[in-house]
């Protein structure tokens, strides 16, 4: 086996792969007019419209201030709109606009492209092994942090 492969710290490799994956995802999403975190927000709303800021924050594991910032940007680009709750006017609920609904196919294409590019040289068996390993890594880190999200 190549000595370079054995000497490269796994944590460093993981960080480098994560940064490269993130950069490529951002570049592909930018072509759709989306920025970091926005596809996850859209996905949460595709699954269930009318969520409150608090519900979205819990779903996305982000702070309420982050949700507010993301929603302001997404309102400006016309993907979402906020409406007062019919029963409690102090509560604001988030809904998709037509643009927010119609971009779903484009976002799904981006994720498929990114998946194909990232795992192009891996066999189905290697992909399955990698999935199992990442699930175990996630479990290890969740246990180490007491199961708390990183914010």
Image (cartoon, grey):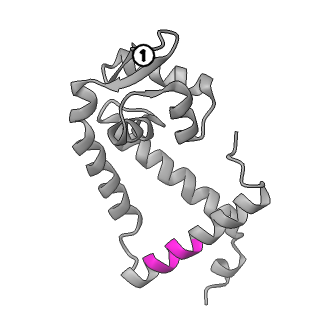
| Residue found at the very far top of the displayed protein | 89
Q: Main secondary structure of the magenta part?
A: helix
- The residue sitting at 40% across, 39% down in the picture is 39
Q: Would you say residue 31 sits in the magenta stretch?
A: no
- Quadrant for residue 66, please give it: top right
Q: Is residue 147 shown left or right of residue 70?
A: right
Secondary structure category for the residue under label 1: loop
Q: Is residue 108 shown left or right of residue 51?
A: left
> Crowding near pointer 1: few (<14 within 10 Å), some, many (20+)?
some
Between 44 and 38, the residue placed more toward the observer is 44
Q: Which residues are magenta?
A: 127-133
| Residue found at the very far bottom of the displayed protein | 1
What residue is disc 1 on? 85
Q: Residue 67 appears at what percent x and percent y?
A: 54, 26
Q: Is residue 3 visible?
A: yes
| Residue found at the very far front of the displayed protein | 87
């Amino acid at each position: 086996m190549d000595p370079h492969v054995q000497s490269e710290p796994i944590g460093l490799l993981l960080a480098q792969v994560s940064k490269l994956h993130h950069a490529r995802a951002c570049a592909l999403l930018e072509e759709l007019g989306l920025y970091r975190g926005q596809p996850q927000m859209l996905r949460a709303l595709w699954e269930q419209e009318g969520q409150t800021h608090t519900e979205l924050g819990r779903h996305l594991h982000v702070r309420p201030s982050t949700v507010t910032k993301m929603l302001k940007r997404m309102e400006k680009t016309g993907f979402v709109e906020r409406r007062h709750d019919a029963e409690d006017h102090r509560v604001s609920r988030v809904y998709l606009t037509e643009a927010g609904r119609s971009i779903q196919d484009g976002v799904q294409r981006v994720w498929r492209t990114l998946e194909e590019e990232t795992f192009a040289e891996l066999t189905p068996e290697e992909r399955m092994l990698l999935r199992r390993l990442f699930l175990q890594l996630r479990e290890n880190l969740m246990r180490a942090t007491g199961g708390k999200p990183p914010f």
